Image: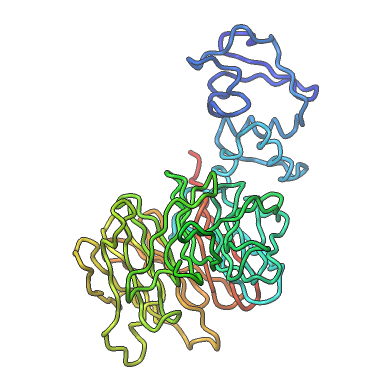
Amino acid sequence: MGAHRDRIRFNVGGRIFETTATTLANAGRNSYFGAVFDDNWDLRSDGPQEMFIDRNPDCFAVLLDLLRTSDLNIPPNIPEKSIYREASFYGILDHVRSAKWGQLDGNRLCLSRSVSGRAPGDGTAIRAGHDGGCCVAHGSIVHVYDWMMEEHPTLNLDHQRVNDVGFIDSENIVISASERLGTSDGGMGLFSSTTGELQYKFEVSHENRPKGFTGGALCFNSDEYRIFSSCKGRSNEYGIGVWDQITGKQIDFFYESPGWSLGDADKLQWLGGYNCLLVATLFPRKDNCYISLLDFRDRKMVWSWSDIGAPHTVDERRVRDAVAMEESASICVVNEYEDLGFMDLRMEGGSSVRWSSRSRLMKGAMPDEPCYPKLAVHGGQLFSSMNDSISVFCGPDWVLTSRLRRGYGGSICDFSIGGDRLFALHSEENVFDVWETPPPPII
């Protein structure tokens, strides 16, 4: 196959290209080019002298240069979509993505683009995918975008309000709804992200009988292929349901404890280091806030906190969102003034909140319809949305280091991080922003 030593020749659409095994090895074992190597990463001696590929030679030249230099240079006469299509064929889309943007760093994020909404009304939620795409929920509609921001077929729940949505992988999306999905008694369904088709519906069984329920907050444990959702039913099936991602079958259910609120949870987060699920029910959904860690191995609540009995004179300490930070063994909460509070997960029986205003960002007047703040943790950085901006906090004391903001769009109702991108959904103009970190310079 190779003419000399480790050289290999390709005929792509009638044009001859010659390269080396070292360059092709950069594509990885699972790429199209991985087939030219044996198990020891040596060029196969039983292959043809010249390998013919019936594809676009102009795009091949760009992608071969990418494998050689790790730099993506697309000539103006070649559409970017053609490069992405060919990269997908050769199995090197991840190389294209890494060349377009680097690992996410909140202090270096730049606004890449803004995408106008496709549905009337305020946005409900935005969720990032693993591959750099996202999905946006508006009422009963979910719009799905791939990493090129090409929109896939719309998911329509026929006037049933979407409560939460999330990617299991690049091909499948789970949606939880306030009413029954379709004609079944289930409030959750698995949909194809590329076709929009409903794959199957999730059921909750109580006393060996399927029961109707409303699906709430969602969370996924990819290592064990589990789906978690808060569930609010009509026949004592209030709590957290657990399903197998592959079969869609219910495998567990954690029922509410007396005086606690799990079925109305606003947020779920899987903590792999603790092998526990964080469940947060927040103000104003409930008059009091409840945050707990559930251990499904022992079927018990191993950590909990509530603000019952705490003084709330002007609502300045009402918790609006919560996120667990495993590295520091703590939970961060935020109030409507973006004061950050911290609780220690190592304290049995819960912990009091240590509020800090050092991180507070000075702002102007509150908008007429402010959006409640949201929290996220990524790469050792803490992100908090407030009105029309997202603040980034770093270091052991979580000092404010940067702020993400653009000039229009109104308040941010939700944001999400994934696929080395940050997506921010604005409520007033029904538009979402895509923030990316520029790739490091090539020396």
Q: Position of residue 165 (x, y in %)?
A: 56, 61
Q: Nearer the viewer, residue 80 or 263?
A: 263
From this viewpoint, is residue 110 visible? no
Q: Residue at x 39, y 53 (%)?
A: 379
From this viewpoint, is residue 180 visible? yes
In the displayed structure, 355 sits above or below 158; it is below
Q: Residue at x 58, y 62 (%)?
A: 186
Q: Is residue 264 left or right of residue 82?
A: left
Furthest toward the bottom, the residue is 313
Q: How many marks?
A: 0
Q: Position of residue 9 (x, y in %)?
A: 67, 16
Which quadrant is the N terminus positioned in?
top right
Q: Residue at x 62, y 78 (%)?
A: 428
> Image quadrant of residue 270?
bottom left
Q: Nearer the viewer, residue 185 or 197?
A: 185
Q: Position of residue 16 (x, y in %)?
A: 74, 20
Q: Is residue 149 left or right of residue 39?
A: right
Q: Nearer the viewer, residue 148 or 7?
A: 148
Q: Nearer the viewer, residue 367 or 188?
A: 188
Q: Is residue 383 left or right of residue 164?
A: left
Furthest toward the right, the residue is 14
> Image quadrant of residue 357?
bottom left
In the displayed structure, 99 sits above or below 143; it is above
Q: Position of residue 11 (x, y in %)?
A: 74, 19
Q: Is residue 300 left or right of residue 65?
A: left
Q: How is the image coloured?
A: rainbow
In the displayed structure, 389 sits above or below 107; it is below
